[in-house]
Amino acid sequence: MTSVVTAGGISVTIRGPVVDASETVLERLVTDGVPGSLASRSPKLWGPDAAPLAARRLGWLDLPRTSRSLAERLAARAAEARERGLDRVVLATAGGAALAAEAMYRSASRSAGTPAELVVLDTTDPHEVSGVLAGDLHRTVVVVADGGAEAESLRRVFGRAFAEAGLDEAESARRFVVVAEEDSALARDAREAGHLFVPAEPDVDGRFGALGARALVAAALAGVGVEALLDDASRLTAALRQPYDNPALALGAVLAASAAGGRDKLVIADHGSGLDGFAAWAEQLVGGALGKDGKGLLPVVVEGVDAPGFELTPDLRRVILGRRPDEPGPGREAGVSVAGPLGAQFLLWEYAAAVAARVLSVDPFDEPDVAQSEASTAALLRSEEGTAPTVVRRPPELVSGAVEVHAAAEGALRNAQTLTEALEAVLESVPEGGYLAVLAYLDRAGDAAAARLRPLLAERAAKVRRHPAPVTFGWGPRYLHTVGQYHKGGPGNGAFLQITGDVARDVAVPGRPYSLGELQLAQAYGDLRVVRSLGRPAFRVHLRDRAEGLAQLTGALT
């Protein structure tokens, strides 16, 4: 059985038993008048407790229209910047805005190219930041979108770097573009410092704001065709009021039916969509919007339809990005395939996540568990003036070459004598029906080999476990703002493998009593504390030498 819903340039194809389950949910949504209520920005859709916050978070529905004037202003700013030789844009932010801007830039670069470079820095890793600082600062403009520990620290670091590169105070100030809400402390600081200020929408957050200022400013300055993205989203807008022939409503029904029906792992594979980086943005949206109150869908982004972990199991719902309904090829029997342009895809998934949240009775805009890790990090920084407390520096359970393996309690590694045995013990700790999250507090560029651990661990899980366990991968601290909410607030069936590494070259944070390396370690320890306090199996692998340690981990799994 196959159902195809097409409108506004988007095609959602649903195959197999999921058709009946999703149509039952769809009929309920139509009967309840959800399409009209959501299109009219009703804050009551998620219950009375959620209504006050929802009333301040539904502006994303209007962004295809309201961002038009911003796009025009940004086009002029981008042209002016390039005339001044500023063709390197660094985006310092975290969460959905960073991932949306990165997807826009990567997709545009793949198709037609852009006149400027965009570097997304949503990290505190000193190696990664040092690599960006080593670029040509005389060509660089820094966009700071909202506050947070990462963005604020990077703003200070780049301010010092501009001064050391010989830029005077006025020119250094002009190299920053700050995107924030009008009455925020960051907006006041930006104006006092002489930075260019762009107001962020007060009724849009970063998770649902892919087409808002927080993401669009950096993308536009890098030369991405923002107006084309808004055009694509606008073509879908009319369909969002419809009870039928509404692909966003259909996708929302699939997400809700999957979570409610026991298929609570959403495995996402790209298959020629041309939308580089979009799956990572969808991951943060689905995980953060739905993962709370012990409910949700775990997004599992895999490398392709042939990747380990894409195999069909009873608790997985598979989504392919890019395949047309009539295309043959591997993975065609997957439950859902979604095709369409990037701007429309952003709006499609935001709408679908909001709809699924209503069915699951969760508030899509609240992030109650994200704050736990932030508070834990802040406590560590206060307690040790920026360094991690010595209480967590217990001896490792296993040392193998450049790799240390730490567990929360003695015996958790089941007396493993080798690195392979230790990793298998980690996999065996995953609860039945659960998942393993690999969380790498490393350099996305210099330590890119860490991402190879996801498919290797997924393959090993299929061999050592009676029932394979999905394996996810996230860079720290990026994941704290993406699926970190799900890790703490979703179903309590996760196990966690955190990876940290020695810092060879640290970066001081001006005006703060800690360095980037110390902040990064506090973020890692802070989140580990919270996860362990919830009773989740959690392990930490520390690399005394990053390259050698990653090679050892890879070798232990092959």
Image: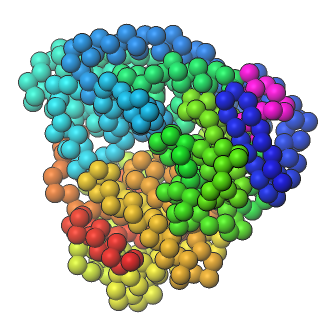
Task: From this view, report whether residue 18 is shown above or below residue 80.
Answer: below
Instruction: Identify the residue at image location x=74%, y=21%.
Output: 238
Report the side of 40 relative to 416 (left or right).
right
Look at the magenta stretch and give its main secondary structure.
Answer: helix
Task: From this view, report whether residue 249 is shown above or below residue 502.
Answer: above
x%, y% of residue 304? 52, 56
Instruction: Identify the residue at image location x=57%, y=29%.
Output: 343
Q: Is residue 269 magenta?
A: no
Q: How is the image coloured?
A: rainbow
Kindly tell me whether residue 309 is visible in this rendering: yes
Which image quarter is the C terminus in? bottom left
Q: Is residue 244 magenta?
A: yes
Residue range (magenta) = 238-250
Report the side of 432 relative to 135 (left or right).
right
Instruction: Identify the residue at image location x=16%, y=25%.
Output: 138
Report the side of 162 relative to 31 (left or right).
left
x%, y% of residue 540? 38, 69
Which image quarter is the N terminus in? bottom right
x%, y% of residue 271? 55, 50
